[in-house]
Amino acid sequence: MRRLLIVTVLLTFFTLVTAKTTITVWTFFGGGEGFLVTELIKKFNAENPDIEVVEQIVEWGQLYNKLITAISAGDPPDVSVMHLAVLPDFASRDALVALDKYVSKSVLEDYIPEIVEKARFDGKLYAIPFDTHPLVLYYNKKLLRQAGLVNAKGEVLVPKTWDELLNYAKQAKEKLGLEVGITSEIGAMMGERLFIAYYTQLGGQIYDAKTKSLKLDFDKVKKTYEFISNLYKSGIMKTMTYDTAESLFQNNQSPFHLNGVWVMAVYPTLKDFEFGVTSIPAIPGSKPFTWADSHTWVIPKKPKEDPTKIAASVKFIEWFAKSAAEWAKAGHLPVLKGVLKSEAFLSLPMRKDYAQVAEFLVPAPSVRGWVEIRQKMWEIGEAVILGQKSPDAAAKELIDFVRQVID
């Protein structure tokens, strides 16, 4: 009897020591990004034998709908990836676990303020961001040299203002007989991302902290649409899809290109492709403010909270955020200041050329309904570019739509 008791106690002890907490994590990353996430999860599992992270890849366009369905059914994953811009729509439905009492203060204090503040909704923290992916400017060094756009040392001229960019793009286009001077897609890239960048540089605000609601300045919205419209009326830009814009730039058919930092996972791997990357230009007197979104980790709410699983989930998402130098190989910028200034990050190809962009980020406002609003921005921006809507009419339509959504 005594021997049986000892064996039972030993087995119980062994079980407690070797027991693992398994957490499921939903991601939507593919290609090189997906590989990096998978490898990081493997590394975490190896370093934390008491926790097993099981990754489930969901198609990017389906994840949010599937997540809503899973939460409603009471069976969501333990952790899910989520764009910062989408967060308010989930947090406002009480669909996410508030993380304030779980996350380390030392981690929160190391965040870029503009990013961590947008991870809050109604004063509560609902997400742990692990990157930011802003809009930046790429330039083709080979084409700029051929167009004679170099300084006395033979270094290519990098535009700092919009006027400089438009002048350089026009010169290169005409001198080299190119079809276009600047490439970019006309949907989200122009309608939301460039719009937010230029509008902010004009001094426009999107979110009113006093009233805690969206607020747009009609004159500045109109000026922004006029600027975007003139890019195409001048012939410097032409309407095209994302894939066409990428193809032209990568094949030396465009001297300048507007896109997010995520393509830095591709460009350095291209053979004989000489390119540079920098912050987008600025209006004189302004700073080079730019649109940015972030990937974050969230913990979807379940019918009954499991403290053990939540603790394991927070341990994983904090670890992932601190490992952002490895994730940054995908091109994204870290959002922890310690990682952003680390040699591990800055030693990656050309990161020193655009790391400073982190100082001028304009994330989406933390308000419910932004997903609908940005979709409308894509539609209105495209209509302006195609000449189907005047800047004046576009400004009125956007402001009226925002009022309808927030009222």
Image: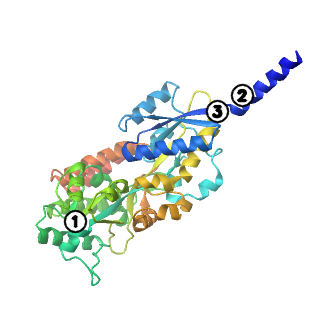
| Numbered tag placed on residue 263 in the rendering | none
Which x, y percent locates residue 196? 35, 57
Give the class, few, some or many, for how many residues have Cα within 10 Å of label 2's Cα (few <14, many ≥20).
few
Residue 21, position as x, y percentages in the image:
63, 33
Q: Is residue 396 above or below residue 285?
A: above
Q: Is residue 234 above or below residue 306?
A: below
Distance from disc 2 to disc 3, alpha carbons, whole Å, reads: 9 Å
Is residue 280 depicted above or below 85 in this figure? below
Please identify the quarter of the rendering in which residue 50 is found: top right
Q: Helix or strand or loop: what does disc 2 sit on?
A: helix
Earlier in the chain: of badge 2 and badge 3, it is 2
Question: What's the CA distance linking mark 1 and mark 2?
Answer: 63 Å
Q: Which mark is residue 255?
A: 1
Q: Residue at x 64, y 44 (%)?
A: 102
Which of marks 2 and 1 precedes in the sequence? 2
For mark 3, what is the residue? 20
